[in-house]
Image (tube, grey):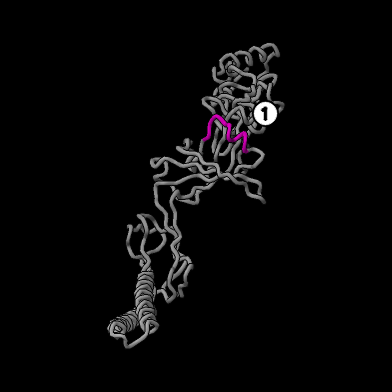
Amino acid sequence: MRSPVFTRLRPARIRMPAAGLISLIGALLAAAPAHATEPAAIQVPTLTVQASRDAASLSLDGTLEPQRQAVLAAQAAGSVRELTVRAGDRVRAGQVIARIDARSAEAGVAQSEAGVVQADANLRNARTQLERTRELRAQGYISQAALDAAENQFRAAEAGLAQARAGRRQATLGQDFTSIAAPFDGVVLATHIDAGDLAAPGRPVLTLYAPGALRATVQVPASQAAPARAARQVEIELPDGRRIAPVRRTELPGADPVAQTVEWRLDLAPGDAADLRPGRTVRVHFTGAALAPTGARSVPTVPAAALLRRGELTAVYVVRENGFVLRQVRAGASHGGSTEVLAGLKTGERIAADAVRAGLAGARP
């Protein structure tokens, strides 16, 4: 039996004149959605970068230090029996923080007590001998020289007793040195010895500081000492980004002979230092026209709105022929509504005054 024959049907070709095809394409383009068209131009105001000598500044790294700090050292020799505190503990004034083996000091006190008893006995004996000698001299049985010798022996006995008593006080004081107490309310910054170690006079035991009273210490180059002294404003930039003014400035009279720097101590207000700890790094800014002498290169400044900050990126939009180009810069200190640009931008260049609008599609100067 023969299989049926299937006939393949081909689609019919539609022939359209060229003029009709062009008309169809035009109709399709006219029906396209409106959002496919080119975005409308957005006018963004621009500005010319200017430089201000009044905004010139000197920025240096500093360190937070306690205004009141003490290194407690041992004043007696012996093994450390107990260390009652650790780093970070708070202590009260008079609180015992370490104890040293007092057996040697106790033996010294006992020896001094025996010396006082012996000196007192010698004094009583010398007094009795002096009284007898005076009676014999009055009766003419001894010479004046014997009386003078008895008086000198009595005076020597008195001096011996005074010396013995002073030795007893010294021994008692040495016994008191076996207990180390806090001189003021504070926080233990570090311990330098552990229980069982051998203490010796002058060996540090721990470092104690008074919290809430901190200062920023900065080393100013000797060549910038005079301009820094004449700066209009001094600010301390804290680790959290806050900027505060010191309540007191102290410039040490001497300079480091090796580093050629002058130490400045800037005291912080108690409220500003409540949450800060010693050892943190801060940034100290000396601001003023005195830091920009005649002939020196001035620092470009831009408004804060012209800077684009995204994470660690700081940039500006620089004007080009048909738009803006994003350029990364390094920002410096801020003064009111202006910010210094330390690198990446030159005086006279045109930039977008609004960095947010300049980043939109269709932004034009």
Q: Pick whichever, 126 or 250, lies toward us.
A: 126
Residue most extreme to the front: 140
At 47% from the left and 51% from the top, the residue drawn is: 278
Identify the image quadrant of residue 30: top right
Horizontal and vertical percent for residue 236? 51, 38
- Within the magenta stretch, is there residue 325? no
Q: Circle 1: is it few (<14), some (14-19), or many (20+) Cα within 10 Å?
A: few
Q: Pick whichever, 1 or 297, lies toward us.
A: 297
**Direction from residue 77 to residue 124 in the image, left or right:** left
Residue 108 seen in the current view: no
Residue range corresponding to the magenta coloring: 225-234
**Direction from residue 345 to residue 89 in the image, left or right:** left
Identify the image quadrant of residue 253: top right
Kind of residue at disc 1: Pro
Count the marks: 1
At 47% from the left and 38% from the top, the residue drawn is: 248
For residue 25, above or below residue 276: above
In which quadrant of the rendered image does the C terminus lie? top right
**Direction from residue 129 to residue 65 in the image, left or right:** right
In which quadrant of the rendered image does the N terminus lie? top right
For residue 282, above or below residue 137: above
Horizontal and vertical percent for residue 311? 54, 38
Q: Pick whichever, 275 or 79, lies toward us.
A: 79
Find disc 1 in the rendering and name its residue.
Answer: 293
Horizontal and vertical percent for residue 58? 61, 36
For residue 15, above or below residue 292: above
At 72% from the left and 26% from the top, the residue drawn is: 295
Q: Secondary structure at mark 1?
A: loop
